[in-house]
Amino acid sequence: MFVAKPMDRVSTAIRENALAYGLLVPLIAFLVLMMWYPFVKGIWISFHHWPFMGQKHNWVGLDNYLWFLKSGNFGTSIVATLVYIAGTFIQLALAVIAAVAVDQKFVKGKTLWHGIYLLPYSMPPVVTGVIWLFLLDPDLGMAQHYLQQFSILQEPVYWMVSTWPARLVVTWCLSWTFWPFMFVIIYAALQAIPRSHYEAAEIYGASWWTTTTRVVLPQIKNSVLIAFIVRLSWNLSKISQVLQMTQGGPGYDTSILPVFMYREAYFSNNFGRAYAIGIFLLILVMIIIAPMVKMVHRAFKES
Amino acid sequence: MHYSWRLKLLIYIVLVLTVLTVLIPLVYVGVTSLKSSSDIFRGSSWIPRPLSLRSWMEALTSLNIHRNMLNSFLSGFGAMLLSLIILVPGAYVFARKSFPGKEFLFYMVTGTLLFPVILLVVPITEMMVQVKLFNTYAGLWLAFQTLIIPFGMWTLRGYFAGLPMDLEEAAMVYGCTEFQAFYKVILPISLPAIIAVSFISFLVGWNDFEFSNMLVTTESIKPATVALYTYTISGEQISWGPLMAMTILIGLPPMILYMLAQRFIQKGFGER
Amino acid sequence: MAIIVENLEHRYGSFVACRDINFQVEDTEILVLLGPSGCGKTTVLRCIAGLEKPAMGAVHISERDVTAMLPRDRQIAFVFQNIALFPHMTIRRNISFGLDMTKGLSKEEIDRRIQGVSGVLQLKDHLDKKPSQLSGGQQQRAALGRAMVMEPRAFLLDEPFASLDANLKVEMRTEIHKLQRNLKKAMVFVTHDQEEAMVLGDKILLMKDGVIQQAGTPDEIYNDPANVFVATFIGQPNTNLIEGSLGFEGKRCLLQQGRFALSFDAAGFKDELRGHDRLVVGIRPENVLINASDRQTCTLSGSTGVCKAKVHLLEPLGSRVVIYSAIDDFEFRSVVLPEHARGISEGQEVVISFDIERAWFFSTEGQRIH
């Protein structure tokens, strides 16, 4: 009995799937060179004292990680990050509400609404950062001017130097810019629901609210989860606005983890510490999205 | 579905409020760019008194903005081309072929979507220095792929998966090899979707800050986003007028391209 | 012999899609692969085409062993259920697609073939349109055209008319039939529609769960089923099945279930019946007689010996009437001419008898005994 040897099986598999593997070469090259290797190299860097463009790299083991944990700013950074993350939830709520609104049958000009809502997301975040830097300026900005006019504010808020206003400003700017991402995905999911579902609900006498909460929203649950998970991860990579508006301050109050990391890398030239902070970011992201990923995975397995 | 007038009103209020939240800042920026500098300092008003093009003149002539925008364009364009080479065959294979190792690879690719890419800024910068791609367009093109590929794969794979299977089989029955079926039949049909994805890829490059800022220090390569950022934190007194004009200059092209891309997306994806 | 299939077996992972498939198709005939969804008929067709690789077995086309060959080298034409015309090409380019891929054909030859085919299929006016501008029937004809211009050794069709409406289906069936006769090329046709199979097939292969249940002419399949599945799959309305325990009463046999007893003369096949204590009798609706006083094959214990069934539904189908009646747990379907159904109404009791000569006897496992 001739039994194929393992190497034969591999070469047969390669031959039979030659086209597939061939077409995958660029993708695999990208994954290895630009994702896996850097990730691993970063870990290597994090165990060293690694000044950028420096000559000497000394092994320091876990010192970089411990430094961050022991620095007084660890807690502040985490809090700021959590506020940022909370902002993502608010973006989600707005995205769902707006998507449901545009999706209603009687709304005309859906493409126009959709197009306008997309505008903030289409611009470079640096640009939207500048816009809000101007609009929220305590002295010249339109926003504070009107807030004072309507007696919501008594006097201009110099948010650049106070902790919580700074955090709110930064989270606001992030939300204004990035909420359309989830909107687009959720809206597409809503559009995919067949008309017959709405008609069936109508025939069985369901009110608008019942239809929306019992028929429509459950069907988009997966899209909502996926959109949120991706957006959360991406939001935590967008730091230009924070850097522009507060530079991570006052102190470190708005230095969300990625900003802290960037400050160490760019301003302090300390790559080792920067990547160590980045690992904390990775862990935080994984903790938060793990249950959601599980939910999505289970839903896919069921279908 | 019966909509009470109250419900309709509520929906429209939601829609209009959202539009206002989006548009009012943008309109105000536009208006400000047409104000004179003293007008700006005077405080908030919606009508420039007098109407002044000074801000625009300054923006267009100073600060090297043309060079920066050209750099943005080049970095985005190259990234787009490179991404197509990776995305189009990759998404096609994932969507329509099965092969040993596919599930593993699928999880890897999906993982990149969830990964906080900013983490890679540090090691990639170090890598670019080592291979002497620091301060080059090529370095940016490669780095941008980390931002483009995950979403591009997600989108394009979904598109390819939606095409009927018989098309390739028909092509193969009537004389094509697998590869010929791909480029003679699947590619031409997919053109709108591929164009849409290219627009998005380009824009990822144009809009980027995190990688561009780390990987570029020389003026000759510096993209517009970095230039804008540098100016705002430079600490000098900011001329808001010209700054507003610059934001429009830098922000308007991607807005337009995004709109166009959406049109292609409707064509490309809506067809199924 | 145009197509020979030997010992074909195909698996999806551990699921066996088809096995022990053996058959031959001549140039002059249409072979129909018939069966319910999931029976494996499409898998067999795709193996012949080369779109699937069988786990075991061989396929020969025109004396060549093509089992290892790619689809494009087999010189066959495949017509898809979903039509699969290339949406971005004109009809002309769609039809000439395969020819354009072939080396050694002059442009004149290609044009000649296109002209010929589009004339036969009435597509001459549509050659420069895109598929989306054509109706379903025209699209399917264009797909046929794409197959025909290749002058293949055989045609393979996968439920090509499934998406067409009823009248169009009948029209296309006739066209295909005429076409095949003219072209004198083997055709293998997959369908789940038994009417289509009976009309088109010179030979029918009825499949279930991946295995051939019976191969034969329409006449054989209809009148001589090999098992219960074949008997009930073919023919509308379905064959009646009567199950009961077998007993003997002198020279005659008796099939009993509850009050009902069916008596018949087993003169020729008593031996075959030995060893079975339960039997299933299959009898077509046209052989279940209503109010035919000269037959008496069944009795109902407790009554005066005559079988009376209660009618609960009448279906007038124009040229005939279907009568649904019942005795206790048994339901009978019967087909009569309209004039014989006059005077019969729902709720009435009628006399039921059976033309036993035309009945089939199956074991309880479904195999045909006689």
Image (cartoon, rainbow, N blue to C red):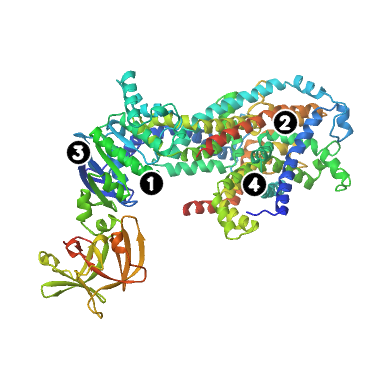
User: Looking at the picture, does residue B168 appear above or below residue A102?
Assistant: above
Tag 2–tag 1 contact (CB < 8 Å): no
Q: Secondary structure at mark 3?
A: loop
Residue under numbered circle 4: A99
Number of residues whose C-alpha sits closer than 10 Å to that of mark 4, classed few (under 14), some (14–19) or many (20 or more): many
Q: Earlier in the sequence, mark 1 or mark 3?
A: 3
Q: CA distance from mark 2 to mark 3?
A: 78 Å
Q: Position of residue C314 (x, y in %)?
A: 35, 63
Q: Are marks 2 and 3 in contact (CB under 8 Å)?
A: no
Which quadrant of the view contains residue C241? bottom left
What is the x, y in percent for residue C156? 29, 38
Which amino acid lies under the numbered mark 3 shown in the image of this protein?
Glu
Frontmost of labels 4 and 1 is 1
Q: Are marks 2 and 1 on the same chain?
A: no
Residue at x 73%, y 54% (from the top left corner): B6
Query: Which chain does the numbered disc 1 sit on?
Result: C
Q: Nearer the viewer, mark 1 or mark 3?
A: 1
Q: Is residue B51 left or right of residue C166?
A: right
Residue A166 in the figure: left or right of residue A84: right
| Quadrant of the rendered image containing residue C246 | bottom left
- The amino acid sitting under disc 2 is Tyr
CA–CA distance in space, label 1 to label 3: 30 Å
User: What residue does disc 1 label?
Assistant: C166
Give the structural element (helix, strand or loop) at label 1.
Answer: helix
Badge 2 marks a residue whose secondary structure is helix
Q: Quadrant of the N terminus of chain C?
A: top left
Other residues around mark 1 within 10 Å, as few (<14) / some (14–19) / many (≥20): few
| Marks 4, 3: nearer the viewer | 3
Residue C216 or residue B59, whichever sits in front: C216
What residue did someone put label 3 on? C26
Residue under label 2: B229
Chain letter, disc 3 residue: C
